[in-house]
Amino acid sequence: MEKAKNLLHQTFIPSNRNDHRPHAFRHFMLSIYSLALLASQFSFGMIQFSPVAANPAQMQEQIFTEINVQRRTNGEIALKENASLDHAAKAKLEDMFSKNYWDHTSPSGEKAWDFINQTGYSYKAAGENLAKGFIATNAMVDAWMASPSHKKNILDKEFTETGIAVGNGLINGRETTIAVQLFGAPAPVMAGNQALVAGEKTASPSFSLSNPVIPGRISYFALYLAIFALIIFDGIMIRLNKSHKNPRHMLAFRTSLGINVLVLAVLCLNITQVW
């Protein structure tokens, strides 16, 4: 019993018996903890994990505002919000979540134009831009503007009306934020539907120091901070014990710190997509 108690003391409690460096919290074990945390992020798809917007309704309003800023800046008239297009965008958004897809075409073959037609909206041209994984409106609009086909939809002088829907839901078992923007050029009821346009799919990494504190990553970030604090504490004790003069100790310490920084880099990374 005494032996087990002494082992626990040596493993977890700082004291003179372990040079105030519990074996469970020395840099070698802390490297293992960091690697385990890193592996868990990849195992649960954290690299592909899409954060969720805190306020989708506010983001929806911001998209409308920023799209019109882009149009005015480029010499085009501002788009007007159309209730029918809003309903169609919301229907498309809900369809993607309910049928578990993110695409211009649903598994059953429905396109954005089918949702527009269901509202009775008559148009001579229509377009659709999609985005997934964005929590910042300006980053989303910048991504659309960086893609020629998405930019064409945004600045197309023929389009005069728009409908937007933003929401959080599950795609392939992961919670994410999806934005749908529909563009329309209204036409008389008998004119029919023509010139349907859509965007091109692009994916890009987004690196931000705010990503570790978004919902879904905050628990990983808390563990990262705990391990980082323990690494710093162990480094201080190495210095106080004069173990820093031993190259092996310093190599192990720097390795544990480097792995921990890599964990933070992965937590800051997110994959955003437009389509």
Image (cartoon, rainbow, N blue to C red):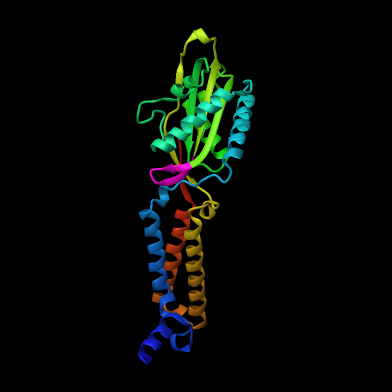
How many numbered tags mark residues here? 0
Q: Position of residue 80 (x, y in %)?
A: 62, 23
Query: Which residue ends up furthest to the bottom in the rendered image?
Result: 2
The image quadrant where one finds the C terminus is: top left
- The answer to whether one can see residue 101 in this image is no
Residue 218, relative to residue 179: is it above or below?
A: below
Quarter holding residue 202: top left
Q: Position of residue 143 (x, y in %)?
A: 51, 35
Q: Viewed as shown, does residue 79 lie left or right of 267?
A: right
* Residue placed most toward the observer, 47 or 241: 47
**Residue pictured at 52% horizontal, 39% vertical:** 167
Q: Magenta residues: mostly which secondary structure?
A: strand
Q: Which residues are magenta?
A: 169-177
> How far across and down, in percent of the image, does residue 110 sit?
39, 25
Looking at the rendered image, the quarter that the N terminus falls into is: bottom left
Does residue 193 appear in the picture of this structure? Answer: yes
